[in-house]
Image (spheres, grey):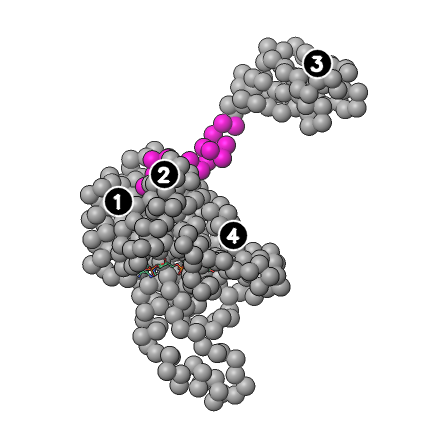
Amino acid sequence: MISPIVRRGISHHNKLLLSSTILKAGSTTATTTTTTTTLNFSSEKLHTIRSPVYNPTRGFRMVSNSANASLTRDKLFDLKGRVALVSGGGSGIGLMATQALVANGAKVYITGRTKEKLERVAQRYSEGEGSIIPLQCDMSDKEQIAQLVAEISSREPCLCILINNAGISGATFQTEASSAGEMKANLFDSSEATFDDWTDTYRTNVAQIYFATAAFLPLLQKSSERHAGWSGTVVNISSISGLVKAPQHHFAYNASKAAAIHLTRMLASEVAGNGLQVRVNSIAPGVFPSEMTTAGSGGDQKSAIAREKYAQKVPAARPGKDEDMAQAVLFFVANQYLNGQTLAVDGGYTLAAGE
Ligand SMILES: NC(=O)c1ccc[n+]([C@@H]2O[C@H](COP(=O)([O-])OP(=O)(O)OC[C@H]3O[C@@H](n4cnc5c(N)ncnc54)[C@H](OP(=O)(O)O)[C@@H]3O)[C@@H](O)[C@H]2O)c1
């Protein structure tokens, strides 16, 4: 039976609570002096919708709607009980990722080569339900990675989230030249143009991702086995530098980031091919404030880039913010249907620069 609900002179009421007993079936019509709203409810859904609230300016708003309960932000991005590791978590993007994970309930181990940075971060940003644990480790050293795995294995039954973020920029060169001779002088004759620069950059930005991911696979797989509906996850922080055609004055760095993007895809493919439930994805950031992109960081381990500096360079007209990175990290970590992907989070940098 259809139960029309008509209320006139409703402007005297801010909210009108309609009980579920009135919403029996079919359609419900509410009329005010200025608007008429028709709501269609299938009989199947009636039992879940308990308290529609009428607001004269905003119409009906459902409260306590259990049909949508699994889709709230608290449910979609809930990381309570999850254990994470962020390499290079002592500054820049690694710190942003660490904060995002901690703020949503995760216990986060952070690594880096500089103990003081890590301790400052743990002291300052361990708040809310999560916590931050600093562990000094050079992630470009296989022995140290093995020790790190042993250390975390001794403390945790599994690792749920691995963020391979540690990275270095390598040397920069003038690439603009007006002759072949000048270009050769810039790129070859320069004393900074060395094979060591290339191998150091690759060691940290590429090989480190490969070795850290491989070493933590058993702990990541255990996370999938322990938590129903969840898969252990790896997020590699690559870069738009691996997507754009311009070398941005550092060929080695940009080539290493392109390699990191392809490595992400290969690892995701091989891990899935072996029947493991571990997702591997990559975030390719545009420009974010960090020790790499600025002169350093302050006592809070945060860095700053003047907004004007990017006013003309990217469609967003600004560098990236903590919130931009935090949202991307949570999306990659929480979305169980995402695997083998790289997403540029860049304010449109790649649109402007061309891939
Ligand atoms: N900021 C950007 O605009 C941007 C854009 C695209 C991509 N990225 C990428 O984002 C990642 C983070 O960089 P960032 O910009 O946030 O710079 P950052 O502030 O310099 O952060 C890099 C962190 O990695 C750590 N690290 C470097 N080498 C390491 C190693 N061998 N072992 C362990 N930790 C190491 C550093 O700490 P220690 O020196 O104390 O070890 C530092 O805390 C990098 O992969 C970078 O390429 C950054």
Q: Residues within 10 Å of mark 3 (few under 14, many from 20)?
A: some
**Horizontal side, residue 297 vs residue 12: left or right:** left
Q: Identify the disc placed on residue 5.
A: 3
Ligand 1 resides in the quarter of the picture at bottom left
Residue extent of the magenta highlight: 68-87
1 or 2: tag closer to the N-terminus: 2
Using residue 12 as the reference point, say whether residue 48 is left or right of it.
Answer: left
Gap in angstroms between the C-alphas marked 3 and 2: 47 Å
Q: Three-letter amino acid code at disc 1?
A: Leu
Q: What numbered label is drawn on residue 321?
A: 4
Kind of residue at badge 2: Gly
Describe the element under mark 4 as helix, strand or loop: loop
Q: Is residue 292 located in the magenta-colored stretch of the structure?
A: no
**Can residue 217 be seen by looking at this rendering?**
yes
Give x and y (percent) for residue 282.
Answer: 42, 54
Q: Is residue 44 visible?
A: no
Residue designated by label 1:
219
Look at discs 1 and 2 and give the one toward the viewer: 2
Callout 1 environment at 10 Å: few (<14), some (14 to 19), or many (20+)?
many
The reply to whether callout 3 and callout 4 are in contact (CB within 8 Å) is no
